[in-house]
Image: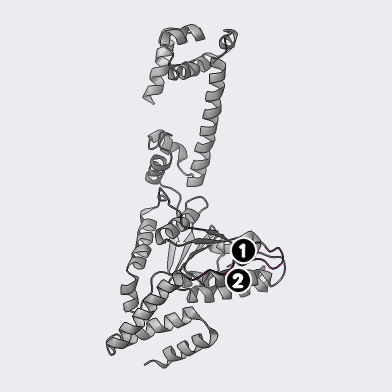
Amino acid sequence: MEDKIILSLVDAALRGDKSIAQMAVRKLASKVRVTNTSLYEQLTSRLASDALRSRDLKRQPLPVDSDSRQSLIRVEEPEMLLKAPIYSESVYESFEQALLERKHVDALLSEGLQPTKSMIFQGPPGVGKTMSARWLANKLELPLLVLDLATVMSSFLGKTGSNVRAVLEHAMSFPCVLLLDEFDAIAKRRDDDRELGELKRLVTVLLQTIDEWPSTSLLIAATNHGELLDPAIWRRFDMEISFVMPSESMISEYLSEYWPDAQGGKRESIDKFKGMSFSDIDRELTQERRASIISAISLRNLAGQKSVDYYEELSLDDKKAMAVKLHEQGLSQRAIAEKLGISRPTVKKSIEDLQKK
């Protein structure tokens, strides 16, 4: 039996460090799997039952800033997501691997291995990093804890470190998914002379936490600026996932799934949004929808006026647009032509042009 494993168990027991104790027991089980089958089965059985109990533990109160008394984290309970985020093939394969590991965790533990416990997302803003954390939490049926960076970061020396430690300790006390968004703000390079010693010490705390993170939970860090991170950070995460700007196929899929009424998948739509992030596309289409609704209301109000003066003041293009709206309201082409003062063929062509789109 390995002396180091025994000493790790002793240290963990004395410190009350459950995550280290679990890791030592897994290593011990792996060592005795062949030589002592009975002990191996008892160890794995206790690890499994402990994991089940930990899901039912009553959660501790949320950590708060000692001065402002504001919560340092935001908790999102698992919710049903009707649509999965749109990923590149490499990102999709990484997530599938991580979920399969959780599904077959017993097989991994029997070999002295643990499932993926930590991931780091890097990539430009608006490409789905935060939504992916929410989607993974949903798939794992775990609550999502999001670090509130604005509250955590303090101007008082020492406060930022204690706030982050409070969040990490709370998240390690029960199964969850913890998202450290804007990770570069608290994990900057320690060789950056512009940073205070407090933030440099904080990086050391983060490194230790990643190493000790329990396998019952998932730690996710997300950054838009991977070049700012301390080099040692990258080596600590089990899985590094790079998000990229949407490709043409991803844009087409996004429009079809999330905006089916916005000519999703058509060539002109894909070309229009090429080079844009999902959040930019979403904002653009939302603005277009608002404008469309307001325009429709204005046209309906105008169409309801009795006086022909309103129609005479409209340009030909506006009359064509109104012809389409009146057609959708059930008016005949002849009635529309008379109401707007344009020819019936013009009305017919305006309606046919819309139907071709």
**Residue at 52% across, 24% down:** 296
- Tally of numbered discs: 2
The magenta span reads: 58-69
Indicate the quadrant containing the C terminus: top left, top right, bottom left or bottom right: top left
**Residue that mark 1 sits on:** 72
- Give the quarter of the image for residue 270: top left
Residue 336: x and y in percent read 46, 11
Indicate the quadrant containing the N terminus: top left, top right, bottom left or bottom right: bottom left
Residue 88: x and y in percent read 39, 53
Find out whether the residues at labels 1 and 2 contact each other: C-beta distance under 8 Å: yes
Residue 301 visible from this viewpoint: yes
Residue 162: x and y in percent read 64, 72
**Residue at 50% across, 42% down:** 282
242 or 55: nearer the viewer:
55
Disc 1 to disc 2, C-alpha distance:
8 Å
Residue 218: x and y in percent read 46, 67
**Residue that mark 2 sits on:** 166
Q: Earlier in the sequence, mark 1 or mark 2?
A: 1
**Residue at 49% across, 76% down:** 212
Identified by mark 2, the residue type is Ala
Identified by mark 1, the residue type is Leu
249 or 82: nearer the viewer:
82
Residue 215 visible from this viewpoint: no
